[in-house]
Amino acid sequence: MVNVSVDIARDGSAPGKARRVVRRQAGALDAALVGDVTLLVSELVTNSVKYGADGTVRLRIASRAPAQVRVEVSDDGHAFVPAGRDRPLSDAGGWGLHLVERLADRWGVETDTSRVWFEIDRRATGAAAA
């Protein structure tokens, strides 16, 4: 079982610190989840650093079973509506929420704050979401 909540200074080192938080939980998570969770956390924290307000990034990781995890990344920024990627595939950047949509089983954006959450649940299927 995992239940972690950390505040990370909102600066260029935040994505690396967030990845380390995920890796410290690796023993309690199914090994097949760790890579996807690490990637998605890194993308969301990077977005928070890039677009969020001053202050900290809050990372919450919760898991009741090794093959199931819920992650929330929030900051003191303003609410936003996610937009689909509309840039050429050859352009760098802009992949964060697209990756969340592809790799997570469920995800969303809280409408009253700058909080993005995702859930990965491999208990039933044992395979990655399509």
Image (tube, rainbow, N blue to C red):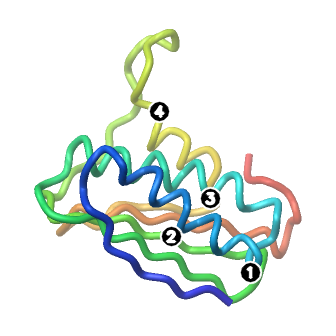
Q: Alpha carbon of mark 3 to alpha carbon of mark 4: how far?
A: 15 Å
Lower position in the chain sequence, tag 3 or tag 4 = 3
C-alpha gap between disc 3 and disc 2: 8 Å
Pointer 1 local density, CA inside 10 Å: few below 14, some 14–19, many at least 20: some
Q: Which comes sooner in the sequence, label 1 or label 4?
A: 1
* Residue lying furthest right: 126
Q: Position of residue 76 (x, y in %)?
A: 15, 65
Residue 93 circle label: none
Q: Is residue 51 above or below residue 29?
A: above
Query: Mark 2: which secondary structure?
Result: strand
In this rendering, position of residue 23 left or right of residue 89: right
Residue located at (58% from left, 48% from top): 39
SS at badge 3: helix
Q: Which residue is mark 3?
A: 37
**Rendered location of residue 16, percent (x, y):** 47, 51
* Residue that badge 4 annotates: 95
* Residue 27 horizontal side relative to residue 81, left or right: right
